Amino acid sequence: MDCIVAINRSSETAVKKVVKQLAREMRREATLTVFCSSRRVRKDYVNRYFWKAIGLILCDGNFSSLVRGYRTITFRGITEGTLIAVMRTFLPLQAYLRVRTYRYGGSRYFNVSVLSRGAFSRLRTSMLETLHRLALGLFDLRGISDGELSALIAGLIDGDGYIGKKGGYISVSLALDKNAKGGVIYTILTVAEERGHIVLGHYRSKPSYEVPFKFANADFIKECLELVFHPIRRSRLRRYLLNWSKNYECGFSVKELERLLMAAYSAYVDLRGGSRKSKVLVLYLRRQVFSNLIDIWSAQSGKPKPVISGNRVMVKIAEKCSKLLKSALKESIKTSGINPQASKVLEKVVKFIKLCNETYK
């Protein structure tokens, strides 16, 4: 029994609905052909989806067969989460997907063939050429843009990626000693590290086929998150981003810090001991003055809550804000014309920045 299903868009809701239909109705011998009837594909998205597909093929597709001359892109024995990722990656490229489901050991798996029809035919040819060049080491990955690189990383995460439940551990599976695929994947991760987007680690347990890494900036995480479609991994990466922002991003903007510096009447540097050995700049503001700054906390989340005691308000500035604080200090001096040594507050700010290993000029 062959069925053809057309969906209006490749959104998460639409794709999950088709997957539920597969799980509910299809038998082992049945196939379902799915395509997206909407032709409105943003041109700037096509290139990123192209590279996302390359990453997905590298991890979970028939990469080895394709570089040996096989012409049809396939994904075999994939789970429901990976099926959703494959569908949401290829359907926006106007591909037709032939899907078969089967059960093994009490679990449901899927085989997907990406058919070369219509507008996708030329894209498929470009994909195969790119995969051949990657396998032969003829494609310089250092020449791709950050947007294309983030799409590749998203493909690796959707394919053979792992994100810990608490969002603190991310890894990609590969085998460097077996085929060219592992080398290509490792090169992608290395390029991302060279550009300062991730930090590679070392997997010390057995079997040693995982490469763990950490993201190094929030913007790159957000770009990857846009194209990670595996439901569980997408949810965990979103949580990872929230935790990363909380731990490494300053909730204040430069302008907001400048306003706080100009309004503070006193300050001190809190040097906290223990294993963390963190540093905190504490600013004191008069409550009446603080009432004119309350909009700072309504503009953006992630800021430490001010502590109100009587007629004074205490605001804590964490060490992660030191770089922005340096810029805010310069703007404050430029605006007010005050010499830092002539102001007790600005003097403490200078001390804080120096303690945070920032060079003050």
Image (cartoon, rainbow, N blue to C red):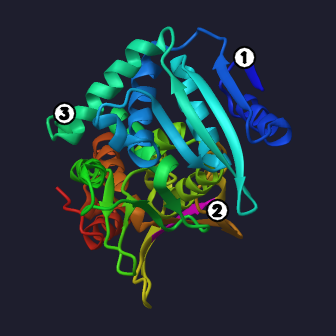
Q: Is residue 33 above or below residue 310?
A: above
Chain-order first, disc 3 or disc 1? 1
Q: Which residue is mark 2?
A: 305
Give the total of numbered labels: 3
Q: Which residues are magenta?
A: 281-286
Question: Is 308 rendered above or below residue 80?
Answer: below
What's under tag 3, amino acid-wise? Answer: Gly
Label 3 neighbourhood size at 10 Å, few (<14), some (14-19), many (20+)? few
The circle drawn on residue 143 is 3
Q: Position of residue 165 (x, y in %)?
A: 61, 67
Q: Position of residue 185 (x, y in %)?
A: 31, 50
Q: Which residue is mark 1?
A: 6
Disc number lying in front (3 or 1): 1
The answer to whether residue 48 is magenta is no
**47 up-or-down from 222: above or below:** above
Q: CA distance from mark 1 to mark 2?
A: 50 Å
Per the image, is 285 magenta?
A: yes
- Mark 1 or 2 closer to N-term? 1
Q: Three-letter amino acid code at disc 2?
A: Lys
Callout 1 crowding tier (Cα within 10 Å): few <14, some 14–19, many ≥20: few
Spatial CA distance of label 3 from label 2 is: 44 Å
- Main SS of residues in magenta: strand
Q: For the point 20% across and 59% down, which residue is it?
A: 360
